[in-house]
Image (cartoon, rainbow, N blue to C red):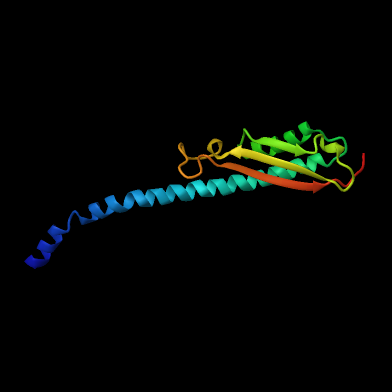
């Protein structure tokens, strides 16, 4: 009985030492998962916003401001602001029947990160592109 008690006392601080070694790696992995998951979520939102902008751009008489408004309306509903929208051709209503209207939406990851200091994707720019063919004529 005494022998087992002695072994317990010798290993009493082992768990604290092991945790001290494992905790930083564990927290880095957890923060990395949070960061990459947020990037994928925002990338999907940008894709949907670009699609909404392209839908607005293929309508008769559409202007770049119509596309910007559609993109910003979609993103603001998700709590995202500060995205940049590019439309080609500009104005989109200048595209002929069957031509594509391309909408590109970009945003720096730093402005949408949930973490105060993004470690892995801090310098990344998220981008989504949507092409839609114009099916009406001017």
In terms of image quadrants, where is residue 9? bottom left
Q: In this view, does 49 lie to the left or right of 18?
A: right
In terms of image quadrants, where is residue 57? top right
Q: Which residue is drawn at 44% across and 47% down?
A: 31
Q: Residue at x 52, y 39 (%)?
A: 123
Residue 76 appears at what percent x and percent y? 65, 36
Q: Which residue is drawn at 79% across and 40% down?
A: 56
Q: Nearer the viewer, residue 116 or 73?
A: 116
In terms of image quadrants, where is residue 92? top right
Q: Which residue, as the protein is rendered here, is positioned at the far right?
A: 138
Q: In this view, does 61 lie to the left or right of 120?
A: right
Residue 48 appears at what percent x and percent y? 69, 46
Q: Nearer the viewer, residue 78 or 14?
A: 14
> How many marks can you see?
0
Q: In which quarter of the image is the N terminus?
A: bottom left
**Residue 70 against residue 44 in the figure, above or below:** above
Q: Which of 35 and 91 is in front in this view?
A: 91
Residue 27 appears at what percent x and percent y? 38, 48
Q: Which residue, as the protein is rendered here, is positioned at the far top?
A: 65
Q: In which quarter of the image is the C terminus?
A: top right
**Residue 134 against residue 64 in the figure, above or below:** below
Q: Is residue 93 left or right of residue 44?
A: right
Residue 102 appears at what percent x and percent y? 76, 43
């Amino acid at each position: 009985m005494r022998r087992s008690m002695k072994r317990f006392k010798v290993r009493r601080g082992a768990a604290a030492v092991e945790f001290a070694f494992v905790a930083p790696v564990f927290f880095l992995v957890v923060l990395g998962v949070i960061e990459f998951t947020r990037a994928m979520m925002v990338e999907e939102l940008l894709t949907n916003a670009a699609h909404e902008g392209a839908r607005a751009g293929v309508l008769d008489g559409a202007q770049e401001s119509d596309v910007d408004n559609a993109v910003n309306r979609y993103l603001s509903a998700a709590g995202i602001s500060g995205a940049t929208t590019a439309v080609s051709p500009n104005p989109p209503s200048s595209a002929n029947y069957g031509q594509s209207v391309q909408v590109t939406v970009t945003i720096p990851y730093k402005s949408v990160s949930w973490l105060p200091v993004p470690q892995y994707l801090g310098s990344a720019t998220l981008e989504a592109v949507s092409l839609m063919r114009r099916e009406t004529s001017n």
